[in-house]
Image (cartoon, grey):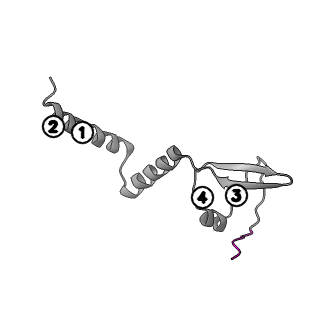
Amino acid sequence: MDTTNVATSEIKARGQLTIPKKIRELSNLEEGQAVSIISLGDSIVITPKRLELDEALREIRKVLKSSKITIEELMNGLREERDNLYQETYGKKG
């Protein structure tokens, strides 16, 4: 089965290149994602640079965006959970 997909794009004045939507979707590329650019003779290969921390951050951002929770609300909730766990484990703070 041939999985080759071809699309064209234009390099802008500052060296920026837009990867066409069709290719981004097929490659699971998302906004803000790092990519590796590999030079192979007179060709280049652009491939997702999958860093675990970057992927975790993207997933957290997706969850925050879909749940409409702010970072501040998340951090406050984490503090509350940590305090509750501390009280369950060690009793009241002195």
Q: Distance between the residues labelled 3 and 1?
A: 43 Å
User: Residue 70: horizontal and vertical position, in percent?
Assistant: 37, 47
User: Residue 89: horizontal and vertical position, in percent?
Assistant: 17, 34
Q: Distance between the residues labelled 4 and 1?
A: 35 Å
Q: Label 1: which residue?
A: 80
Q: Please name the predominant secondary structure of the magenta segment in the image.
A: loop
Amino acid tagged 2: Glu
Residue 93's quadrant in the figure? top left
Give residue 88's mark: 2
Amino acid tagged 4: Leu
Q: Distance between the residues labelled 2 and 4?
A: 43 Å
Q: How crowded is mark 2: few (under 14 residues within 10 Å), some or many (20 or more)?
A: few
Q: In this view, does 29 lie above or below 36?
A: below
Name the front one of labels 1 and 2: 2
Q: Label 4: which residue?
A: 29
Amino acid tagged 1: Glu
Q: Distance between the residues labelled 4 and 3?
A: 12 Å
Q: How many marks?
A: 4
Please state the extent of the stretch shown in magenta in the rendering: 1-6
Name the front one of labels 3 and 1: 1
In this rendering, position of residue 80 left or right of residue 34: left
Q: Label 3: which residue?
A: 18
Name the front one of labels 4 and 3: 4
Q: Which of marks 4 and 3 is nearer the N terminus?
A: 3
- Which of the image's four quarters has the C terminus? top left
Q: What element carries label 1?
A: helix
Tags 4 and 1 in contact by the CB under 8 Å rule? no
Q: Which residue is drawn at 60% across and 65% down?
A: 25
Tags 4 and 3 in contact by the CB under 8 Å rule? no
Q: What element carries label 4?
A: loop
Q: Earlier in the sequence, mark 1 or mark 2?
A: 1
**Outermost residue toward the front in this view:** 1
